[in-house]
Amino acid sequence: MEIYDCHLHTTYSKDGKSTLDEMCGRALALEMRAITVTDHNEPDTPGFPAYEHIRQSVAAAKRKNEELGGRLQVYAGVELADQFIGGQDPAPYYEMDLDCILGSIHSTKMYSAFFSDHAFGSDLLQSAQKADMDFLKKFVEAYYSELRKTAEKADVDVIAHLTFPLRYINGRANRGLDIAEFYPLIDQVLAAVVKTGKALEVNTSGMATDWKHFMPDEDILKRYYALGGRFVTTGSDAHRAENLGVGIPEAIHMLQKIGFTHGSYFVKRKRFEYQF
């Protein structure tokens, strides 16, 4: 089975724990076919100046790919969270030699309507633990409204971790939110992914935790398939080398069961396929 891990973070991301060398060493040990380095477009913070840390990440990935001489393909990407974090102009990212752009909802202004800090992680977890369910449902509704806009309008290649709020609400806070309640909104996102020719990511990071869920899970992937969606990527979202590739073989088996026959990856922002 060929493994393409199309979503990972290195120490060029503020929350990355492993270097690119460590990630590549792990990928080689696992005999992966390819990885795509997709560091976060962080706000301008100490040690992570806007744009420059992504330029460095891209250059490092290109150097590493040449160094490895085909033993492992190393592609350069970026995870553009909402495109306009901290008022950033996204245009400079499109001038970089990127292979893949992930689109995700991490810190959009929508979050500030619910949480005190755009650095949503601790606020979302705290709210997931303590807020009433109606509050959380309103947040999830707003999330899918923003994600639909990203799928419809953003110049990105992949829509990442579709059910991202569940990582906190159910995975960490164990609140038991029923995602099926939001299927009508999710279907709008999926329809936009299909219409615009983007790929949908199967994010396997939950498999590295006690939560043991994909983002999205099988039911939503079946809905995507029924809408005509056929373009999928797999990504561990690893921030540590030991989590690289975790859950991807299981995700591929799930996708095959649904009817998917090929995975996608991107080179110079063009989509290519490999057979499952």
Image (spheres, grey):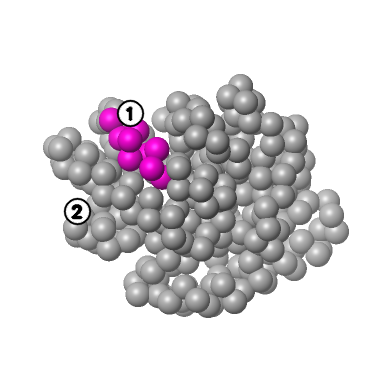
Of labels 2 and 1, the one closer to you:
1
**x and y percent of residue 219 in the render?**
45, 26
Asked if residue 13 shows in the view, the reply is no
Residue 58, picture quadrant: bottom right
Q: Residue 26: within the magenta? A: no
Q: What residue sits 45% from the left and 48% below the top?
A: 192
Principal secondary structure, stretch drawn in magenta: helix
**x and y percent of residue 230 in the render?**
60, 38
Spatial CA span between label 2 and label 1: 22 Å
**x and y percent of residue 140 in the render?**
27, 43
Is 143 or 152 nearer to us in this picture? Answer: 152
- Residue 98, placed above or below residue 70: below
Q: What stretch is highlighted in magenta?
A: 181-189
Is 203 or 20 nearer to us in this picture? Answer: 203
Residue 121 horizontal side relative to residue 273, left or right: left
Q: What residue sits 63% from the left and 66% below the top?
A: 98
**x and y percent of residue 89 in the render?**
43, 77
Q: What residue sits 54% from the left and 32% below the top?
A: 225
- Identify residue for label 2: 114
Q: Which amino acid does label 1 sit on?
A: Ala
Residue 133 horizontal side relative to residue 72, left or right: left
The disc label shown at residue 227, or none: none
Q: Which residue lies furthest to the top in this view?
A: 257
Q: What residue sits 67% from the left and 68% below the top?
A: 60
- Identify residue for label 1: 180
Secondary structure beneath dot 2 equals loop
Secondary structure beneath dot 1 equals helix
Residue 130 horizontal side relative to residue 120, left or right: left
Is 194 or 156 nearer to us in this picture? Answer: 194
Residue 79 horizontal side relative to residue 63, left or right: left
Is 82 or 193 nearer to us in this picture? Answer: 193
